[in-house]
Image: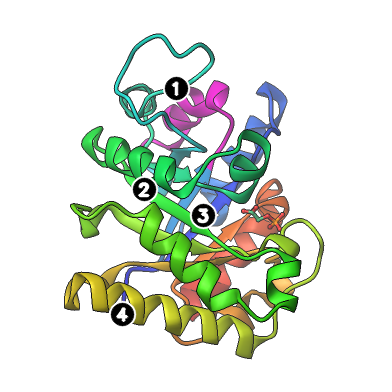
Amino acid sequence: MARKLAAGNWKMNGTTAELSEVAALTAAISDATCEVLLCPPATLISRMADMAQGTGLKIGGQTCHSEASGAHTGDISAAMLYDAGASHVILGHSERRADHGETSEQVAGQSAAAQAGGLIAIVCVGETEAERDANVTLNVVGTQLAESIPDDCDLSKLVVAYEPVWAIGTGRTPTIEQIAEVHDHMRSALTERFGQGADDIPLLYGGSVKPSNAADIFAVSNVDGALVGGASLKAEDFGGIVSALSQA
Ligand code: PGA
């Protein structure tokens, strides 16, 4: 089985006041048997990384540029995230794809840059509601997966997150059968492309994961963890998800 990972995505939330949640989280996860990651806004990475020292908590970024440095106002490089104390970076989140027009080809470039900069790339894919209704979910996810991961990817530094766009922040989740179908499809596609090494790539589900539905989702085959938005903001909720994954 791939290593288990509970990843929190704080999105554009959090200032100094919310660092108290990190202190509470490090205490709550002291018995965790899975990896635990928080991806705060870039402004908090360094301070959170200091707080996470010596605990089981890892810290990540929410995007990075495909180039190592240069004239890209407002952007952040993999080396900068690494230098601030990040071990992972979320790439190609549907909010980045929608708000900033990021394409899968760009995400592949970011993934390569992230790995070259020493980070684990968490590549996100997922269909819109219209695509699910049109019955093209597996095609959409398969194409995004194929195009967002570079050919020379270091599989030991890759995580994939399946996040149906319509399930993000809505309180709605796919059925267990729908999650299983997509995750099995992703595992097969990755194995076909990369060989047996793909068995160890953690496949996360994301979209309205909370303590009350986490155990059912973690029982699904080829679900190795979760990418959690809203419920990662409170240590109590995220701690509940981490303990569900530890017991899965
Ligand atoms: P959510 O967000 O848990 O708030 O639905 C998930 C995500 O966007 O990663």
Q: Residue at x 26, y 41 (%)?
A: 115
| Disc nearer the start of the sequence (1/2) | 1
- The part of the chain drawn in magenta is 39-53
| Residue 99 place in picture, x, y as percent | 67, 37
> Which residue shows up at 54% across the image and 68% down it?
140
Considering only order in the chain, which callout, 4 or 2, is on the residue closer to the N terminus?
4
Please say if 207 is above or below 136.
above
What residue sits right under mark 3 in the picture? 7
Where residue 188 sits, quadrant-wise, is: bottom left
Q: Tag 2: Cα neighbours inside 10 Å, few (<14), some, or many (≥20)? A: many
Q: Amino acid at mark 3?
A: Ala
Q: Nearer the viewer, mark 1 or mark 3?
A: 1
Q: Which mark is residue 121?
A: 2
- Kind of residue at disc 2: Ala
Mark in the foreground, 3 or 2: 2
10 Å crowding of disc 3: few (<14), some (14-19), many (20+)? many
For the N terminus, the quadrant is bottom left
Among numbered discs 1 and 4, the one appearing first in the sequence:
4
Q: Is residue 43 left or right of residue 166?
A: left
* Other residues around mark 1 within 10 Å, as few (<14) / some (14–19) / many (≥20): many
